[in-house]
Image (spheres, rainbow, N blue to C red):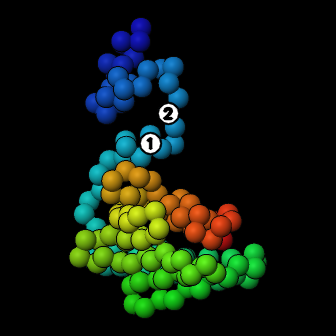
Amino acid sequence: MAHAMASSLPRIGLFIAKLYPATHRMQPSEFLHTRQPLAPMTDLDFLNHAEALLQQLETACDRLNELADQDIDNQRVGGMVTLTFANRSQIIVNLQKPLHEVWLAAQSGGYHYRFDGQAWLDTKGQGEFWAQLNQDASRQAGWPLVFNGL
């Protein structure tokens, strides 16, 4: 019976069914690997999505400073935002327009993100932009910080 069900699945479903038996519950991170590739992003699309990301980051810093009594200095120059924490450590987020990527540089390393139509995902499969920013900012500030959702 299971074989009959698997044979009725589309090709991608059959592939996933072989990787993950019926007893396996997929985790949210596993869904990232099943997304279909999108059409290439235009320069204008990239700039619109990237600008929105940088504005969200600036707004989140301002709100964290107001609501949580944090001391995060954020300075923007063109397509780059530099976050400086009270201990003088920094996180830099900048746009790489020719590559259609957003780069994040922190003490933990450098990360490259591309927009997949829903989220900014690391090009090496290391996760989503906001999750990495929250993790690095919390580590560098010395207390939990959450930038997205503010």
**At which x and y percent is residue 35?**
37, 46
Few, some or many residues within 10 Å of mark 2 (<14, 14–19, 20+): few
Among numbered discs 1 and 2, the one appearing first in the sequence: 2
Q: CA distance from mark 1 to mark 2?
A: 7 Å
Query: Do we see residue 9 in this rendering?
Result: no
Residue under the point 37% across and 50% down: 125
Residue under the point 44% across and 40% down: 30
Residue 31's label in the rendered image is 1
Quadrant of the image for the C terminus?
bottom right
Nearer to us in this view, 129 or 89: 89
Quadrant of the image for the N terminus?
top left
Q: Is residue 109 placed above or below 67 in the rendered structure?
A: above
Tag 1's secondary structure? Answer: helix
Tag 1 and tag 2, C-beta contact below 8 Å: yes
**At which x and y percent is residue 32?**
41, 46
**At which x and y percent is residue 53?**
48, 74
Query: Do we see residue 99 in this rendering?
Result: yes
Q: Is residue 57 left or right of residue 47?
A: right
Residue under the point 35% across and 22% down: 18
Few, some or many residues within 10 Å of mark 1 (<14, 14–19, 20+): few
In which quadrant of the rendered view does residue 20 lie?
Answer: top left
Q: Amino acid at mark 1?
A: Phe
Tag 2's secondary structure? Answer: loop
Q: Is residue 111 placed above or below 65 in the rendered structure?
A: above
Residue 74's label in the rendered image is none
Residue 26's label in the rendered image is 2
Q: Which residue is most to the front?
A: 87
**At which x and y percent is residue 141?**
62, 71
Q: How many marks?
A: 2
